[in-house]
Image: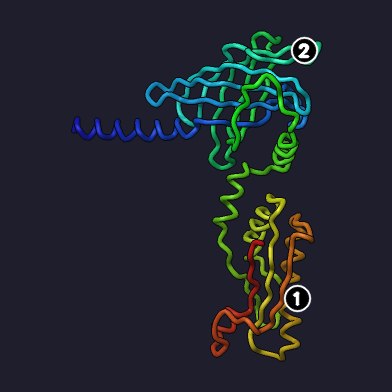
Amino acid sequence: MQKLAIIALICFSQNLIGQINFLDGTWQGIITTGAETYKQGTAIWFDFKIDKITGDMKGESRLETPFTNYFAYKNIKGKAEDRNLIHFEDVIIGLQENDPGKYWCTNRGTLSYNDSTGYLTGSWTSEDCKRANGKIILYRSKYHLSKKDTASLYHSWFNNFAGDLERGWNAYYVRDSEMRNFQFVPVYFDHDKDSLKAEYLDYLKNMARIVNSHTDLRIKIIGHTDSNGTDEYNVDLSARRAEAIRLYLISQGVKADKIVIEFRGEKDPATTNDTPEGKRMNRRVDFEFI
């Protein structure tokens, strides 16, 4: 019994270590004060490592006033309980360039990782800046925190990120994963009909959400019919079915220029037209991301 308890404790500890060390690395995002909007905030970077045994966290942070040369480079320390709670505090402000009339503060706060959004979020307070406080939101960075004594004026990422947050978008890597793992299924129609069935609305809403959350992603809609009717009639029917989907996606915020339509009539069946079930499966609209 004692051996089982020890094994369970080891497994729990290994799982906790994996969760904690998942957070190691560089994160970039926005820190806001009070009622500031994201676009009114300050760019912030964290780069830290967490001890596998103790959970002690050490690293650096950097604040940059967007589109200026003003910055502050700091050393930070803290403690990670797991990926859902990290305590941090600024130890010392090193290199810095300050906006006249202002000064950089030392802060402390907490951060936690959200699996659904992919963001590291939390709050902060400052003891030396009249108890200022606010929020922090970060995403995992592709880049390294700069330790130079000048700030880059390349802050277009800041406005892009603020826009993502205002639109309610998840982190870019979460959105990419959702797109890659999205399972396309056909939308089926009744015989000789182009009316969209209510049972497909949630599926199409989710599709629209993914298309909307990628600026460079488009969706192709491909209409089909069974073999009943003339070729000319079926081409028109498949076009009307594709158009019904197109209009619904537009109603969900997808821009018209992000939608491509094809209509193939009966020329590209999914299965045989020799049975009622086969014809039912051919009365469809298919999709693909482009």
> Which mark identifies residue 187?
none
Colour mapping: rainbow
Which amino acid type corresponds to the residue marked 1 in the rendered image? Arg
- Tell me what residue is drawn at x 48 percent, y 31 percent: 83
Which amino acid type corresponds to the residue marked 2 in the rendered image? Lys
| Residue at disc 1, secondary structure | helix
Residue ranking furthest to the right: 100
For disc 1, the marked residue is 240
> Which mark identifies residue 102?
2
The picture places residue 185, in percent across and down from the top left corner, at 58, 67
Crowdedness of circle 1 by 10 Å Cα count: few (<14), some, many (20+)?
some
* Up/down of 201 relative to 270, above or below: above
* Up/down of 56 relative to 202, above or below: above
Name the quarter where the N terminus is drawn: top left
- Tell me what residue is drawn at x 76 percent, y 22 percent: 69
The picture places residue 186, in percent across and down from the top left corner, at 60, 70
- In the image, 92: left or right of 220? left
Q: CA distance from mark 2 to mark 1?
A: 62 Å
- In the image, 76: left or right of 214? left
